[in-house]
Image: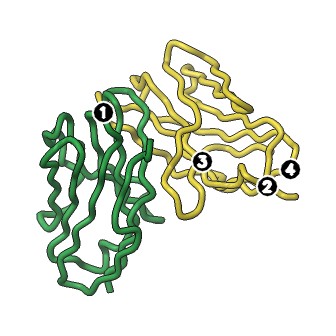
Chain colours: A green, B yellow
């Protein structure tokens, strides 16, 4: 099993540009999570999908952030327009059931907005 | 070596010694807890979990202890190795699906 796959590993962009982060969860997992990690705030849950449906997006910081899960094997997190304060590591994680089950994390996308 | 939860975010331990990493959780209703290990440049990696109906659970070289009375969780690593150097996070299941992560403890293993 290849685990959770994220792309790109690193993204450097200029303020105002659109950024799209991609995630392929573990096959068979029905729950997908997007997290953001910074030194100041640690790991923050942005959005949670269950069976491709967004269940809780209360962690999405602003309307500039959006996430989609068109099918069970793919999800995107988009930031438009990006700002320097969005610089962080973004992790995608998946789990089999979502409720009280361990999460498997991808390697993350290091985003730098200049 | 021993750390005291979120108030001492770093732990230095001699190779071969046992490590104890502590975590104070916030929600008395939490029923599921996980320890994750995060190495530099990688995502958090599952180490061990425990449900609230248990006090102790053992894995390979790791033991998790849960004290619900004082809302305290600890991770014990036996015979710490250089590969154990990482940031360790405790996480509690605070809602149906949400995991709330602690700030993390950086463990450095001295040769």
Q: Is label 2 or label 1 in front?
A: 1
Q: Chain of mark 3?
A: B
Label 2 SS: strand
Label 3 SS: strand
Residue located at (76% from left, 43% from top)? B2
Residue indicated by mark 3: B88
Report whether mark 2 lies on the same chain as mark 1. no
Label 1 SS: loop
- Marks 3/1: CA distance? 27 Å
In the foreground, B86 or B99: B86
- Marks 2/1: CA distance? 37 Å
Other-residue count near label 4 (Cα within 10 Å), few / some / many at <14 / 14–19 / ≥20: some
Report whether mark 3 lies on the same chain as mark 4. yes
Residue located at (27% from left, 60% from top)? A22
Residue located at (54% from left, 21% from top)? B68
Tag 3 near tag 2, CB within 8 Å: no
Residue located at (41% from left, 26% from top)? B30
Q: Chain of mark 1?
A: A
* Disc marking residue B15: 4
Residue A40: % across, % down: 45, 65
Tag 3 near tag 1, CB within 8 Å: no
Which is more N-terminal, label 4 or label 2?
4
- Marks 2/4: CA distance? 6 Å
Residue indicated by mark 1: A28
Tag 3 near tag 4, CB within 8 Å: no
Task: Determine which quarter of the picture holds residue B22.
Answer: top right
* Disc marking residue B109: 2
* Disc marking residue A60: none
Other-residue count near label 1 (Cα within 10 Å), few / some / many at <14 / 14–19 / ≥20: few
Residue B50: % across, % down: 53, 24
């Amino acid at each position: 099993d290849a685990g959770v796959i994220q792309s790109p590993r690193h993204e450097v962009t200029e303020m105002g540009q659109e950024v799209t982060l991609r995630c392929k969860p573990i096959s068979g997992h029905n729950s997908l999570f997007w997290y953001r990690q910074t030194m100041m705030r640690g790991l923050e849950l942005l959005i949670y999908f269950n069976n491709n449906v967004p269940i809780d997006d209360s962690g999405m910081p602003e309307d500039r952030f959006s996430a989609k899960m068109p099918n069970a094997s793919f999800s995107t997190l988009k930031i438009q327009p990006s700002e320097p304060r969005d610089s962080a590591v973004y992790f995608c994680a998946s789990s089999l059931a979502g409720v009280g089950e361990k999460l498997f994390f991808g390697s993350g996308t290091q985003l730098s907005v200049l | 070596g021993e750390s005291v939860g979120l108030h001492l975010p770093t732990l230095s331990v001699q190779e071969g010694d046992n490590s104890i990493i502590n975590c104070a959780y916030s929600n008395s209703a939490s029923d599921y807890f996980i320890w994750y290990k995060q190495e530099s440049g990688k995502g958090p990696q599952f180490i061990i979990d425990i449900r609230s109906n248990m006090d102790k659970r053992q894995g390979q070289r790791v033991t998790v202890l849960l004290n619900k009375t004082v809302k305290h969780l600890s991770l014990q690593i036996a015979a710490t190795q250089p590969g154990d150097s990482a940031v360790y996070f405790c996480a509690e299941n605070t809602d149906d699906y949400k995991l709330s992560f602690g700030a993390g403890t950086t463990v450095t293993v001295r040769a």
